[in-house]
Amino acid sequence: MDKRLLFQFLNGCRLGVLSSLGPMGAPQSALVGIAITPELEIIFDTVEKSRKFANIARDPRVAFLIGWQGEVTVQYEGVARQISSPELGPYHEIYFRKLTDGPSRLSGKA
């Protein structure tokens, strides 16, 4: 699949299943809201108290399952990274455009 078609498909999805490795190496999955950059980076958020945050901090290798309507999916593997404050601007813009409740969740009002 070419990059443009892959972006269109992924950008049409609001949710994905994130899989990370638990403390004993067992897979753990969670449903998360997602947004996609034109470079095919997946943006998602989590809180520091979540098991996925702890898992990714310990071992950043992750996998995503995205899409399931019409039995079409994308399996996406990679390395997650926490974005630092100076980098957040463009990622926030993309994420909040897609997940409009993001700003209220960020402020703790959701």
Image (spheres, rainbow, N blue to C red):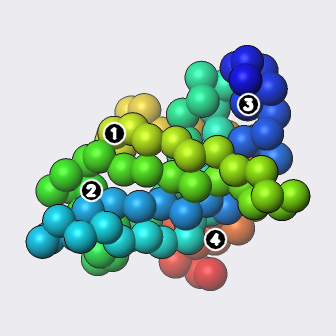
Select label 3 or label 4 by which is in front: 3
The residue indicated by pointer 3 is 7
Give the image location of residue 61, x and y in percent.
Answer: 29, 46
Q: Secondary structure at mark 3?
A: helix
Q: With 52 as the anchor, is 4 left or right in this view?
A: right
Q: State the residue at coordinates (24%, 70%).
A: 26
Q: Quadrant of residue 9?
A: top right
The residue indicated by pointer 4 is 104
Q: State the residue at coordinates (82%, 47%).
A: 12
Q: Which mark is residue 70?
A: none
Pointer 4 or 2: first along the chain: 2
The residue indicated by pointer 1 is 79
Under mark 2, the amino acid is Ile
Give the image location of residue 46, x and y in percent.
Answer: 43, 65
Determine the CA span between mark 4 and mark 2: 24 Å
Q: Nearer the viewer, residue 84 or 30?
A: 30
